[in-house]
Image (spheres, rainbow, N blue to C red):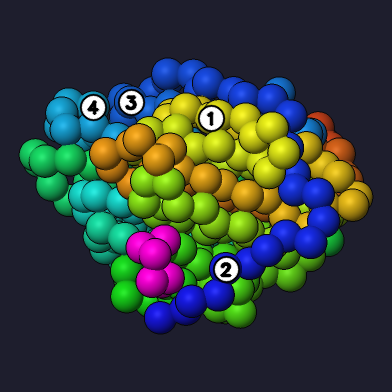
Amino acid sequence: MNTSITTLRNPARRVERVVLGQATSDGAGVKLTRVLTQPLQRRLDPFLMLDAFGSDAASDYVGGFPDHPHRGFETVTIMLEGRMRHHDSVGNVGLLGPGSVQWMTAGRGIIHSEMPEQEEGRMAGFQLWVNLAARDKMTAPAYRDLQADAVPVLRREDGVAVRVIAGESEGVAGAVTRPTTEPIVLDITLPPGRRFDAALPAGHNAFVYVYGGSGVDVGVDAPQRVESDRMAILANDAASDGVRLTADSAATQPARVLLVAGKPLGEPIAQYGPFVMNTTAELQQAVADFQRGVLAA
Ligand code: MN
């Protein structure tokens, strides 16, 4: 039990912009909400995409994501509810259950499938794409499955709970640490009226996505309300050391918030579907390698 409550010593980050995700489908007809879309990749460098999925209807997810390739970045799958089976060209097999996380480094190439292992019930979670630096894009592919109990949780006496998926929070080391982009990924549960101050390096680009309960107030002075199912891009402020999130005191359910931050790469971003490189020529090479069957060889 951790009883400390961080107090931000410097101005807290404020909301720069609130974004409502776009309903779309991907894979074999899986319905999802694309929260972080391509036009935001530069602003939220090193993050390339955030999809949120959540449905009780099997027809929304049962097609899953059959075999498909990736090159040049990392995919992070955060399961909240339901079960997905992973197979890949490296030979990894994994079952992602509620609360589990999969961190996959596509590097020079991987072909994988992500298929629901259920025909009814609720399926919910996120997929986040984290870019790799130019020098790391052709690294060997790697994969980690983290079951729910392998994700460290910061629990406070006031009911605030923070699953530290990546990075660090109040001295709790996350399940995953990555060099270069130094991502911080926190899954935060905030009971009504409670607050959480998250330390964030000033140079990191950062956003929050409110996905459950009622809205949260972001900031200290004149905080801005961010309603559920919305992303708030946090302003970069060289003098700021973090962000304050406060749940609505009149709420009946805890607010659920995904907080994501990372160090920008500042490199050109070229994307063609599941390939993210630095130049068009590198994308053409990725397509050619996939067509010749050597992308994941
Ligand atoms: Mn994939």
Q: Name the residue under label 4.
A: 60
How far apart, in angstroms, are the residues tagged by discs 4 and 3? 5 Å
Q: Which mark's residue is nearer the viewer, 4 or 2?
A: 2
Question: Is 254 above or below relative to 271?
Answer: below
How far apart, in angstroms, are the residues tagged by discs 3 and 2? 38 Å
Mark 4 or mark 3: which comes first in sequence? Answer: 3
Mark 1 or mark 4: which comes first in sequence? Answer: 4
Amino acid at dot 2: Ile
Residue contact at pointers 4 and 3, CB within 8 angstroms: yes
Residue contact at pointers 1 and 4, CB within 8 angstroms: no
How far apart, in angstroms, are the residues tagged by discs 4 and 2? 40 Å
Q: In which quarter of the image is the N terminus?
A: bottom left
Residue contact at pointers 2 and 1, CB within 8 angstroms: no
Residue contact at pointers 4 and 2, CB within 8 angstroms: no
Q: Name the residue under label 3.
A: 31
Q: Mark 2 points at which residue?
A: 5
**Image mark for residue 252:** none
How far apart, in angstroms, are the residues tagged by discs 1 and 4? 27 Å
